[in-house]
Image (spheres, grey):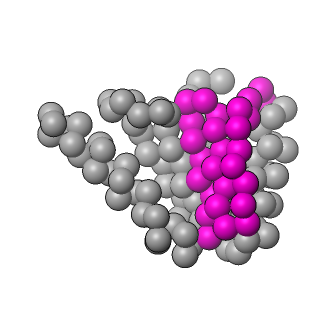
């Protein structure tokens, strides 16, 4: 599966399972540990785990390899190699504001810094 097809599949699973504020960051043009980062809100700590379980259930049969996952009730990070997925409750998303960090990296790259 191509990278964009994989991203579409991830977003579809998250959307189907009621994740909120799903964002995808394209990091092809910068030096980062992944080519794409997906961030999504879970409704509550149990929903975080349910989203992760749904991703495994739907994507593994399609050949997706889950290399590593750091699991907690509030925040799960999934490493698929060239894709990182962050599933978190809204409070954690606001606190850590990964979007601002990634946006700043992208902006600096586009400005040539």
Q: Is residue 98 left or right of residue 29?
A: right
x, y percentage for residue 52? 75, 53
Number of labelled discs?
Answer: 0
Q: Residue furthest top?
A: 1
**Relative to residue 85, is residue 109 depicted above or below?**
above
Q: Is residue 61 left or right of residue 51?
A: right
x, y percentage for residue 51? 74, 57
Q: Is residue 63 left or right of residue 99?
A: right
x, y percentage for residue 58? 80, 43
**Relative to residue 98, is residue 42 depicted above or below?**
below
Please say whether residue 12 is visible from this viewpoint.
no
Q: Residue 3: which quarter of the image?
A: top right
Picture residue at 50% right of the left edge, 44% below the top? 37
Picture residue at 37% right of the left edge, 49% below the top? 102
Residues 12 and 76: in front is 76
Picture residue at 80% right of the left edge, 52% below the top? 54
- Give yes or no for residue 72 being in the magenta stretch: yes
Q: Residue 45: which quarter of the image?
A: bottom right
- Give yes or no for residue 35 being in the magenta stretch: no
Quadrant where the N terminus is found in the figure: top right
Please say whether residue 35 is visible from this viewpoint.
yes
Picture residue at 15% right of the left edge, 34% below the top? 112
Magenta residues span 62-89
Quadrant where the C terminus is found in the figure: top left
């Amino acid at each position: 599966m191509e990278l964009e097809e994989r991203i579409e599949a991830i977003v579809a699973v998250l959307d189907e399972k009621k994740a909120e504020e799903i964002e995808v960051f394209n990091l092809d043009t910068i030096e980062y540990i992944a080519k794409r980062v997906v961030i999504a809100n879970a409704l509550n700590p149990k929903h975080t785990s349910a989203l992760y379980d749904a991703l495994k259930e739907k994507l593994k049969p399609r050949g997706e390899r889950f290399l590593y996952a750091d699991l907690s009730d509030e925040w799960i990070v999934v490493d698929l190699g060239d894709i990182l997925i962050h599933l978190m409750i809204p409070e954690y998303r606001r606190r850590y504001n990964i979007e601002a960090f990634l946006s700043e990296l992208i902006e600096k790259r586009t400005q040539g810094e």
